[in-house]
Amino acid sequence: MKEAISYSQSNEIEESSLDEREASTLLPSVSKPRLTRRFQAAIVAAYIVVFVLLLINTALLLRARSDSRLVNKEWSDCGNNPQEARDRGCKFDITNFSWQHEPCFDRELTDEFVSKMEFRFFKEENQTTEVSFDEALQGELDLWVPWELHMQHCLYAWRQMHRSIGSSSRQLNNQLLDFNHTMHCGMMLMRRDREMKGINTKVLVNYPACQI
């Protein structure tokens, strides 16, 4: 009886070991999640590299195009205040929160931006005094806006840059031609620590120069 019991126990141990070995072949490798995370990180890094290269390429194309077609043209800004800007024939571009000379003013993009506008504007960060959209369009006030508007500004700025590349008449102001602005927008779009709807960005009315 003892031998039978021993044999039975041995069979149970062998079967248990076999089951464990078979089960182990069905379990996913412990290293797979790590490989997945590394793969995801590699993809993100690749996207960032491609993104930066595209920005550099765009900036180089714009500068080469600007240098070749703006010979004998002079830089002219829109003054230092809204009244001076109006007197010089400039128009307020809310996509850039800036007063622009006609050659640098992309009316089609601005009209599109305005038609989709659903943002709120405030005079103070604590949102004490809200400003109407029509008042914001006058281009006379520095305002506090949601982070999402900052992102939209960058997207529309890039669209304006590419539209300028494909046009013989559209110009770009000196701010959009500045590669630092392009890199700034790229970095801002990758941030994830800001609330998109939060009133956390102050925009200043500015008066960039345009070659006319």
Image: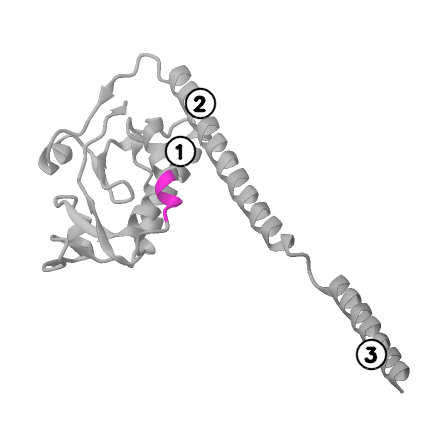
Give the total of numbered labels.
Answer: 3
Residue 1 vs 149, above or below: the answer is below
- Name the amino acid, label 3: Gln
- Report which quarter residue 59 is drawn in: top left
Q: Residues within 10 Å of mark 2 (few under 14, many from 20)?
A: some
- Name the amino acid, label 1: Met
Q: Between marks 1 and 2, how big is the CA–CA gap? A: 12 Å
The residue where tag 1 is placed is 161
- Residue 177: tell me if it is visible: no
Q: Residues within 10 Å of mark 1 (few under 14, many from 20)?
A: many
- Toward the viewer: 204 or 35? 35
Q: 147 left or right of 121?
A: right
Q: Bounds of the magenta span?
A: 187-191
Image position, residue 40 (x, y; %): 56, 48
- Name the amino acid, label 2: Leu
Q: 33 left or right of 125?
A: right
Secondary element at image label 1? helix
Image position, residue 192 (x, y; %): 37, 51
Q: 153 left or right of 47?
A: left
- Image quadrant containing the N terminus: bottom right
- Toward the viewer: 2 or 190? 2
- Report which quarter residue 142 is drawn in: top left
Seen from this angle, which residue lies furthest front? 2
Using the image, tell me which numbered label, if any, was put on residue 9: 3
Q: Determine if the magenta segment contains residue 72.
A: no
Image position, residue 203 (x, y; %): 20, 44
Seen from this angle, which residue lies furthest bottom? 1
Q: Residues within 10 Å of mark 3 (few under 14, many from 20)?
A: few
The residue where tag 2 is placed is 60
Frontmost of labels 1 and 2 is 2
